[in-house]
Image (spheres, helix red, strand yellow):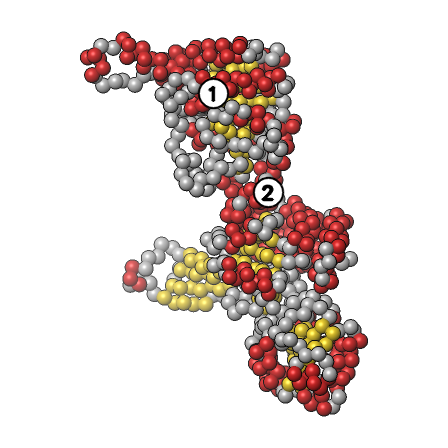
Amino acid sequence: MAAMDSSRDFVKDVKRVVIKVGTAVVTRSDGRLALGRIGCLCEQIKELNYQGYEVILVTSGAVGVGRQRLRYRRLVNSSFADLQKPQVDLDGKACAAVGQSGLMALYDALFSQLDVASSQLLVTDKDFEDTNFRMQLSETVNSLLDLKVIPIFNENDAISTRRAPYEDSSGIFWDNDSLAGLLALELKADLLVLLSDVEGLYSGPPSEPGSKIIHTYIKEVHQAKITFGSKSRVGRGGMTAKVKAAVCAASAGIPVVISSGYASDGILKVLKGERVGTLFHQHAEKLVSLKEIGARDMAVSARECSRRFQNLSSEERKKILLDVADALEANEKLIRTENEADVAAAKLAGYEKSLVSRLTLKPGKISSLANSIRVLADMEEPIGQVLKRTELADGLVLEKTACPLGVLLIVFESRPDALVQIASLALRSGNGLLLKGGKEAARSNAVLHKVITGAIPQAVGEKLIALVTSRDEIPDLLKLDDVIDLVIPRGSNKLVSQIKEATKIPVLGHADGICHVYVDKSADIEMARKIILDAKTDYPAACNAMETLLVHQDLVKGGQINDLVMALRLEGVTLYGGPRASAELDIPQAGSFHHEYNTMACTIEIVDDVVAAINHIHSHGSAHTDCVVAEDEEVAESFLRGVDSAAVFHNASTRFCDGARFGLGAEVGISTGRIHARGPVGVEGLLTTRWILRGHGQAVDGDKGVLYTHKNLL
C-alpha cells in the first residue's frame, strides 16, 4: 500500500467530503451510461460510508443520458423521409428532464444492491438566492447524513431560468463543478473531490507530448502557464471549469483534489492521502517540496514574487528588511542549535578544519548579521533611483533608472552566514532568489531560510527566496537562461569552473582567491608585520586571506625578511617558498604559485622590485585582492596603477576586501570578472538599468519635427 504523501496529511482530519462526477465519467463515448464506472463509484462511496465519512455526491450526466434516449426515440418514430431532412438539435431542457429520471434510477438500483440508501436533490441557480432555502438545504443534508443516506445533487436543467444554461456564465453557479464548490462551502465540507476523465490537471493538454501532471497547484506558479485543451466531449465545462471551481473552494479554505473517475479505487486513494490527482489548497506553496514544483517553476515563482515586491513602497520594503533582522535575533537560539548539529556532524564526518570553521556561526554572528541587514535597510532606496536625466528635446525627458536584475541563482558552500547576506541583498535590490547551499550546512540553511521567508508578507510570497535542497536540481536550473538572469557561485575553484562550463547564464564570481602582499624595500617593517599577520591569520579560510607574500630582495640582504618569517611561524603558519625563497630561507618549495591554501599556510617568494612583483601577480594571481606595503609613494602608485585586480590596496590588509567593510551592508560575493561588477558585490552589483522616456505626444517622423537639445538635467 502506498504511503501517505506529506502534502496530503490534512486528509486525516477529513470527515465530510463532496464528490463531483462529470458527464465524461458517467457516460461512454457513444453517450450511453458507463455502468462499470458508475458501479465502481458507488462501491467506493459505500466503503467511505462504512468507514464513517459523510459523503455528498454531485453528479452530471442527465443531459447526456436524455439526449441519447431522445435521439433513439426520434429515430424510432421517424419515417425515411423525416430522416432526409436537416435534423434539429434536441432541446436541452427536455434532455435533462428525460435523462434525470434514468440517471437517478440507476444510482438508486446500484446503491440498493450495496445496502446503501440514496436521495435526490435537484437545485437551480435561483434557489441559492433565498437565505431560507440555504438554511433548509443544510438541515436536510445533515439529517440525511445522520441517517447514513447519500445525498445526490444535480442542477435541475429542466426548469433552469437561465436563457442558455450551457453557455451563460453569470449567476451563483453555472455548472456542476461550480455547484459542487458552492455546496462544499454551504455544507462545510472538509474536502471536495472533482472526478474527471483524466488523472488530474496537466501542464498542457494531456494528449500532447511533454505535458506533465501537476500534483499540487500553486496559483502564482501555474496560473499563467497552463494551456487547456478543448472542453469536455460531452459536458459543458471541462478542465477549465474544474480548475475555476477548485481555485475558488481552495481559496475559501476547502482542499480540492481533481482526480480520475476511471480508476476503480481513485477516491479511496485520495482519502488515504496518496499522491494522486491534483491538489488545490489554501496553503499549497507550503505543502510541496521545491523538487515537486520543478526548476523552471521555482524560477518563475521567484520572478513573480519579485515583481510584487518591487511594487511595494520604499518604506514597506524597508520594513521587511527590519522584520528579517528582528526575526533572526528572536530565533538565535534555534539557529545556533541547528548550526551546532551541522558542525558536530561535519567533525564526525572528518571534514577539514577550514570547512568546519566556515560552517560555524560563532557567538555574536547572528547579531552582527542582523545589524548588517539594518544598515542595508537604512541605505538610500536603490530601486527606481534616477541615475541620469536628460532633456532630449522640448517636453521630451529621458531618465536612466536603476532596477533589479531579475532572478539570481546563488550556489554557495559551507558558510550559512552567506545565506543571510545574500538573501538580505536580494531583498534590498528587489531580486528573486534561488539558493543552493552545501549539504554540510543543510540544517543551518533550512532554519535560516525558514526564519527569513517567515518575515516576508504573504502579499509578496515566500517563494521570493527559494531554497534548493538537492544537487540534482542544479543542472536543470543552469539550463534556464530564459528565466534566471545571473548565477553567482561562492565556493571552490572546482565549483565555479563546473558552473561556468554548464550554463549559458552569465556567471559572476571568482574561481580563486590567491591574494598577494608585496613588501617593498621602503616598507615600515612593523607595519608590514601587522598587515601580513592579519591578512594570513585573521581568517585563513576566507577568499581575501593572503596566500602569497612577495618580499623585495633588499629586505633579504638587510635581514628584515627574517622578522616577517619569524612572526608568521610564531602564529603557526606553515611556509612554502618559491625557487629563490626556498633556497634562501631553507623552506620546502611550493608546488605551484597558483595555489589557494585556505589554511594557516602560505607561499613566500623574493622579487627584484615592484615591477617584478606586479608581473608575478599577473602571472600567478587570480585578480582578487593584492596589497603593497611601501612608504615610497611612487612605488605605491606604480603598484596601484599596474596591478589589474578587482581590489588593490596600499598599506592595508587584504581582509578589508569585504562588502560590509566597504560599506555595502553585505556582499553577495566577490567578482574578479571584468563585466558588470568587480570586487565585493553589494546592492549596486545586483542592479541593472532601464530607460524611461516621458513625452507629450511627440513622434520621430524622420526627425523632421524634433529639435534635439540633449540637455543634462541630472
Q: Which residue is labeled 1 in the image?
A: 37
Contact? badges 1 and 2 (CB < 8 Å): no
Q: Which mark is residue 289?
A: 2
Taking depth in this image into account, of 210 and 337 the one nearest to the observer is: 210
Q: Which sits in the foreground, 681 or 583?
A: 583
Residue at 56%, 42% (x, y): give it.
292
Total labels: the figure holds: 2
On residue 495, which mark appears? none
Q: x, y (%) of residue 589?
A: 68, 79
> Can residue 136 be seen in this snapshot?
no
Q: Quadrant of residue 556?
A: bottom right
Lateral position of residue 560 relative to residue 240, left or right: right
Image location of residue 275, percent across then percent down: 57, 33
Vertical arrangement, residue 539 with respect to residue 294, above or below: below
Above or below: residue 542 compared with residue 109: below
Q: Residue at x 38, y 23 (%)?
A: 29
Q: Secondary structure at mark 2?
A: loop
Quarter of the rendering containing residue 513: bottom right
Q: Nearer the viewer, residue 100 or 25?
A: 25
Q: Which amino acid type is shown beneath numbered disc 1?
A: Arg
Residue sitting at x 38%, y 14%: 66
- Quadrant of the snapshot with the N terminus: top right
Residue drawn at the location 47% of the way across and 59% of the way down: 504
Residue 73 drawn at (x, y percent)? 31, 10
Q: Which sits in the foreground, 111 or 427? A: 111
Specify the amino acid type for callout 2: Ser
Q: Label 2: how many residues lie within 10 Å, few (<14), some (14-19) or many (20+)?
A: some
666 versus 110 height, above or below: below
Residue 381 is situated, as x and y percent measured from the top left of the image, at 58, 57
- Could you tell whether 618 is left or right of 228 in the image? right
